Image (cartoon, rainbow, N blue to C red):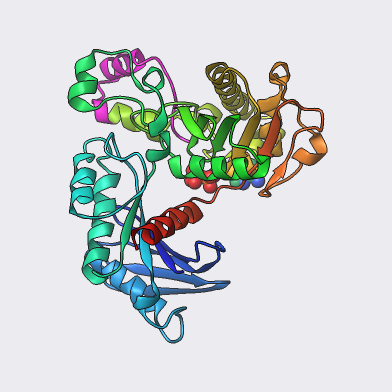
Amino acid sequence: MNILIINAGSSSLKYQLMDPETGVVSAKGLCERIYIDGRLTHKVGDKKVVKDIPMPTHSEAIQAVLAILVDPVEGVINSTDEIDAVGHRVLHGGMEFFDSCIINDEVIAAIEKCIPLGPLHNPANLMGIRACQAVMPNTPQVAVFDTAFHMTMPPVAYRYAIPTEYYKNDSIRRYGFHGTSHKYVTKRAIELMGRKEMKLVNCHLGNGSSLSAVKDGKCQDTSMGLTPLAGVPMGTRSGDLDPAVVQFVMNKYGMSADECLNMLNKKSGVLALSGVSSDFRDIEDGAAAGNEDCALALDKFAYEVRKYVGSYAAALGGLDCLVFTAGVGENSPEMRERICEGLEFLGVKLDPQKNAVRGKETIISADDSKVTVWVIPTNEELMIAQDTADLVKAAK
Ligand code: ADP
């Protein structure tokens, strides 16, 4: 099977052509500068081509992708008929979507309904969907939502303690994000541990970071909220803070709410604490060279992640399995060690030799650790491809 995976942004569109059974990616690439001029970067194995192609809308971008996929020289398939289905990444499924689903008019209307919750991403995701429908009307399209995995959370986890009208009228509640990644590593953890019945905490630690508490395969809680700003500090996001900080800063510096939120989303997190970079490699280098602000940024990040792990162990009533994934989680043994230091009371014991690993699916806990700690490289695209293939097969 060939599944085309589309991640449409406001002026960009990423794609991959993948076999959902093997996970093999035959081609992938990126359309940039849509609405401005248009550039396509296409990769097959190690070979990369860059072409300037006019892309006045997402439609031309999709057409350019399909054209290069069937190109006799650069392409990997003979005809677009060889694309069995398209899987679209959609940011916000609101309270409408509990799982991935085949796209029809109703689904499009429901994604539109979620625009107030994902005002930047959902319209772009919809443009990608509509462009594909227009150029490949007979190919099934599937929507895979960043929020869906978390929809099994109980009300104690998802309700905010604010007047009920905001929940009832405006759907304001915790949703959580990175759901496709949390779903993928949960699925892998269940396969690797050989059992579904367990208490699992997933740490997706990248430029954006979130944790999830999972019981018997179902999400019980997650650290991001109505938006991805909540939870642990991130590359440039503040994570949780007293909401009165917003009012204080707005009043004192004459900022608008948008300006303040921009500061919390783009100028905060480990970037702000380190004063050096949002990239954990730069901060680790800085700390190693004796920069105290960098050391504080790493300590703060580890401290907040550790607190979440502890609180999720309390929420789940125990902990059997702890998973690290995404850029930092997969690649930084130092950060994993910092986080796990102090979690011995929960039964977490890392094996320093096993932990000295980057980007590889493996156990990193000691043989006598009560909690099994894993590094599981995430693969959101594979999860999208598998969900898409499963739904399309089931519909036949
Ligand atoms: P995104 O949220 O953009 O998908 P990623 O999951 O790719 O981000 O994670 C990016 C982060 O991972 C960056 O901060 C980067 O510094 C960090 N990272 C990647 N490799 C390493 C490494 N070897 N050591 C420490 N941090 C790393």
Where is residue 159, by image quadrant? Answer: top left
Q: Give the residue drawn at x 80%, y 35%.
A: 352
**Is 107 in front, or is 350?**
107
Q: Give the residue drawn at x 31%, y 26%.
A: 260
Up-down: is 192 above or below 395?
A: above
Up-down: is 258 above or below 327?
A: above
Q: Give the residue drawn at x 60%, y 26%.
A: 293
User: Left or right: 383 with respect to 133?
Assistant: right
Q: Quadrant of the C terminus?
A: bottom left
Q: Give the residue drawn at x 42%, y 60%.
A: 389
Residue 114 place in picture, x, y as percent? 23, 39
Residue 282 in view (yes/no): no
User: Left or right: 271 with respect to 339?
Assistant: left
The quarter of the image that holds ligand 1 is top right
User: Left or right: 18 with respect to 37?
Assistant: right
**Is 328 in front, or is 199?**
199
Residue 65 place in picture, x, y as percent? 36, 71
Residue 57 sits inside the magenta stretch: no
Residue 85 place in picture, x, y as percent? 36, 65
Residue 324 place in picture, x, y as percent? 62, 37
Residue 249 sits inside the magenta stretch: yes
First to last magenta residue range:
235-258
Where is residue 376, by image quadrant? Answer: top right
**Is 140 in front, or is 224?**
140
Residue 205 in view (yes/no): yes
Count how many numbered circles sit on residues in the image: 0
